[in-house]
Amino acid sequence: MSRDSLLKKPKVPLPELVILIFLSIVFIGVIAYIYYCTDVNVPNLVLGSVFIVFFISSLAILNELYKKLEKEYEKNLELERIFTAKLNRTYEGTLKALSSALDLRDHETWGHSARVIGYAVAIAKKMGLPPQEIRILAWGGFLHDIGKIGVKDSILLKEDKLTPEEWREIKRHPYIGYDMIRQVDFLEEAAEIVLFHHERYDGTGYPMGLCKDEIPLKARIFSVADTFDAMTSNRPYRRPRSVSEAIKVIRSQAGRQFCPECVKAFLQLSNTELMEIRRGMVGIDEMAFFHRVLTPDKSKLEKLNLA
């Protein structure tokens, strides 16, 4: 039995419905016949009473049948809740396993991903994306650097400036990450974010050199959030920029590195909002974070600025 069939509102089965309609017609016909075409006497009154009792009994039987169907519907709802809970645990486990694998290589991955998701979701909300699209954006954002698992430690953890050859190695990580997660059904759409999050609006990005609307919208949104967090975070080779400085850079790159519409939505966020998102991601428990991202209930998503 499919999930949708489990959740269909129960209806009176067709045979019983036909019988009910037939009995109603017969009942009305008999009463009309007794009233208009026969004398009002004891035998006719008895006959009418019998039909009334029979009709009421039929209604009672059908009512019991409907109650039984209601109970079955409630049972199916409970099965749906159990199914959803198990599915969410599977999602959480998959994301946890993937993120933990990368976090063992680069301990800053979790914090960076959480902050970027916060910024990206805030931008997406300004642009009016529906909740399901926001969830996909969050999944893709959380795993956007998963492909770095395939990059050598000597390059990934290097504190000095990378050589051109090392940069070519780094630029492979979107392909590696895409190949990893596109095989997971519920991450298929999120895989596009992993593949395209380093593309630039003017076509000078990587790995495919896409431009403008060739780049999926969620990847364009994520690019703004990812760059903002990178600029405002500490790195071994440079100090972080202030929020105001980073905003100026984002604004100046509209139409070049970034989608103008995404930049417009980003600029609607105040410095206070951006700082609140950043502070809100500090010290968050990972499994609680996964649960909130995966939960379609809007009130729960709002607690993490995800709705």
Image: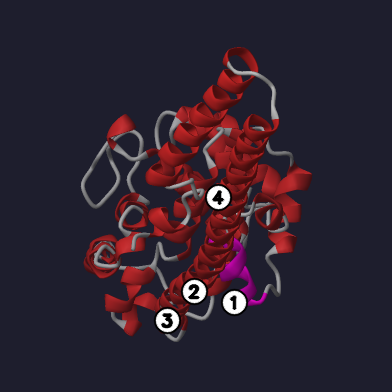
Judged left or right of residue 255, residue 50 is: right
Mark found first going from the N terminus, 4 or 2: 4
Q: Is residue 96 magenta?
A: no
Secondary structure at badge 1 equals helix
Quadrant of the image for the N terminus?
A: bottom left
According to the picture, the residue beneath numbered tag 3 turns out to be: 97
Secondary structure at badge 2 equals helix
Q: Residue 50: x and y, percent?
A: 62, 42
Question: Closer to the observer: label 3 or label 4?
Answer: 4
According to the picture, the residue beneath numbered tag 1 turns out to be: 287
User: Dots 4 and 2: beta carbons under 8 Å?
Assistant: no
Q: Residue 111: x and y, percent?
A: 59, 70
Q: Residues within 10 Å of mark 3 (few under 14, many from 20)?
A: few
Secondary structure at badge 3 equals helix
Judged left or right of residue 130, residue 277 is: right
User: Dots 2 and 1: beta carbons under 8 Å?
Assistant: yes
Mark found first going from the N terminus, 3 or 4: 4
Region in magenta: 285-294
Q: Residues within 10 Å of mark 2 (few under 14, many from 20)?
A: many
Is residue 86 something one can see in this rendering? yes
Q: As shown in the figure, which amino acid type bears the numbered disc 3? A: Ala
Q: As shown in the figure, which amino acid type bears the numbered disc 4? A: Leu
- The residue shown at (56%, 33%) is 128
